[in-house]
Amino acid sequence: MNPVPLPALIEPACALSLAEAGRLLREGRLVAFPTETVYGLGADATCDRAVAAIFEAKGRPSFNPLIVHVADAAEAEALVELDDRARLLTARFWPGPLTLVLPRRAGSPVSLLASAGLDTIAVRMPDHPVALDLIRAAGRPLAAPSANRSGAVSPTLALHVVDSLGARVALVLDGGPCRVGVESTVLDLSTATACLLRPGGIAAEEIEAALGSPLARAAIDPHAPKSPGMLESHYAPGLPVRLNATTAEQDEALLGFGDIVGTLTLSAAGDLQEAAANLFAMLRLLDGGPHRAIAVAPIPEHGLGLAINDRLRRAAAPRGQP
Ligand code: TXA
Ligand code: MG
């Protein structure tokens, strides 16, 4: 039998807890922290042992590459090779929910495990004062996936982290609810044509406008999925999820949007930003309720709707064998 995990230590982010968190990170321990998107499970990105602890704590079946968080663009220059496109995008969108996949710089101190042995590294500068203070307090870049067990709903409150990870994390810094609510947009700049790998907090349309050219995004085109069955189950609540519902069937909770009023409603005004910010917390609330399934109203497929629908399709994808 597995022992019941002890609760994690949770502290409001302040000068004292940030200094303690920085010390823990330098010792190779894990610290969860708020970003503008979701809470991250941070480790020293330059330390193999610390990065390995992330995979262990999340129960990740495979070594997916992690995002390396930096406090400014100059710090990124020491880790990866930025080209003109990358400089334009960092000037326009950093700090913010845009992750750039770039060629690893020769001599880059980032653990090979953090990039899963690839010759590229994903970097991002989060738009949250606690995250930036923590990176500076640690004095090194931080590898950080979302602070939840693998496959589960991402955390947008410190309490979600405690629920999901317990004492697998040394300290949770509480910075209140996450403003954006869905993870960063991941853009691959290691190829001639910039490629959208994951829709997220910065709309693809905004990036295309900044670059003045369309992004490659074939792999995630919702109108031409390779096979719905190939969608990896992720962001999955305990209950089954049914998409594009206009009404709830018997015993179903309805997650509404716009004119479709539900048990909970992502945004009555039909505002995609508000919906993104509410998405994971509302899925968690409905999951903990008395229903047998969660039905979700249709969400428009533009702007942040791309990221919301991506997460919802994965939440509704067939679950793997335990
Ligand atoms: O908003 C976010 O991005 C949050 C917060 C904590 O910053 N982090 C996050 O990390 O969502 P994670 O590990 O859940 O997602 C990392 C994504 C994955 O889709 C991964 O495949 C991709 O980034 N990725 C990381 N490194 C990559 C690389 N070198 N090449 C291609 N994709 C990469
Ligand atoms: Mg995640």
Image: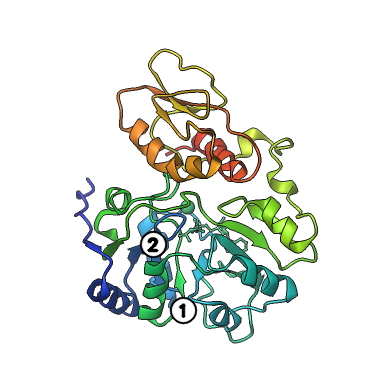
Contact flag, marks 2 and 1 (Cβ < 8 Å):
no
Instruction: Label 2, secondary structure: give it.
Output: strand
Gap between marks 2 and 1 measured at Cα: 15 Å
For label 1, the crowd category at 10 Å Cα-Cα, with few meaning under 14, some 14 to 19 and many 20 or more, is many
Asked if residue 234 shows in the view, the reply is no
Give me the residue at 52% from left, 83% from top: 109
Q: Is mark 2 within 8 Å of ligand 1?
A: yes
Q: Percent x, y for residue 190? A: 72, 68
| Quarter placement of the N terminus | top left
Q: Is residue 305 above or below residue 258?
A: below
Q: How many marks?
A: 2
| Quarter placement of the C terminus | top left
Instruction: Label 1, secondary structure: give it.
Output: loop
Q: Is residue 140 above or below residue 231?
A: below
Q: Percent x, y for residue 313? A: 57, 36
Asked if residue 261 shows in the view, the reply is yes
Image side of residue 103 versus residue 312, left or right: right
Image side of residue 47 versus residue 310, left or right: left
Q: Percent x, y for residue 318? A: 53, 33
Work out which residue is located at the far bottom of the displayed protein and give it: 107
Q: Which mark is residue 46?
A: 1
Give me the residue at 71% from left, 66% from top: 189
Give me the residue at 66% from left, 68% from top: 89
Give me the residue at 49% from left, 35% from top: 319
